Image (tube, rainbow, N blue to C red):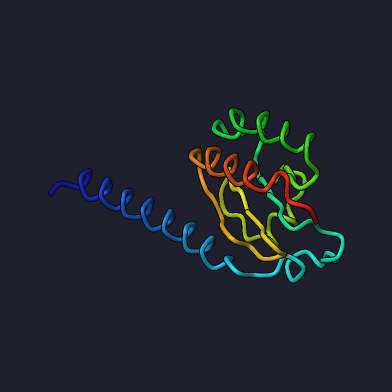
Amino acid sequence: MNVIEVLVLALVAIFIAYNLFILLSGWRQKGRFVSDITGANSEQQSSWQVYYFYSPTCGACRNMTPILEKHGRENSSVICVDVSVELELARQFNVRATPTAVLIESGKISKVLLGSGLLKQANQFITEHKNDKN
């Protein structure tokens, strides 16, 4: 193996390790109470919420953000968060990459969705819970 092949393999290994780290940090969030993270009063929260974390410089986010912002205008349980503005909230939710959606049911994190494929799952979650009462 020459030096270039070794460097390429090292970069691929680092990329895979970083992506696994991001996925594991999302899985560790599952089951945490949102009030423990944000200090929010659980009595004021609805039975479900979606926190969508995006960055204006992210290409995948530019495609998804208008759709999720529309959901946010229609339903106060969908919260769109610009990580460049709300850095502390993103840190509290352990957001390491954008786009990320945190799905919350009954005050607990039920799922953390990452990447450009999250739109379909987030839309499905919102549709299923749209008529739920607080």
Q: Total label count?
A: 0
The residue positioned 63% from the left and 53% from the top of the image is 102
The residue positioned 27% from the left and 48% from the top of the image is 7
**Residue 102 visible within the image:** yes
40 relative to 95, above or below: below
Q: How far across and how far down the image is residue 44, in percent?
A: 87, 60
Q: How far across and how far down the image is residue 65, in percent?
A: 65, 33
The residue positioned 25% from the left and 50% from the top of the image is 9
- Work out which residue is located at the far left of the displayed protein and give it: 1
Q: Quadrant of residue 105?
A: bottom right
Indicate left or right for 68 with 60 as reference: right
Q: How far across and how far down the image is residue 83, in percent?
A: 70, 46
Q: Quadrant of residue 32?
A: bottom right
Foreground of the two, 28 or 33: 33
Q: How far across and how far down the image is residue 129, in percent?
A: 67, 48
Q: In which quarter of the image is residue 39?
A: bottom right
The residue positioned 53% from the left and 44% from the top of the image is 121
54 relative to 15, above or below: above
**Residue 81 visible within the image:** no
Task: Specify the quadrant that holds the C terminus.
Answer: bottom right
Indicate left or right for 29 with 88 as reference: left
Foreground of the two, 70 or 3: 70
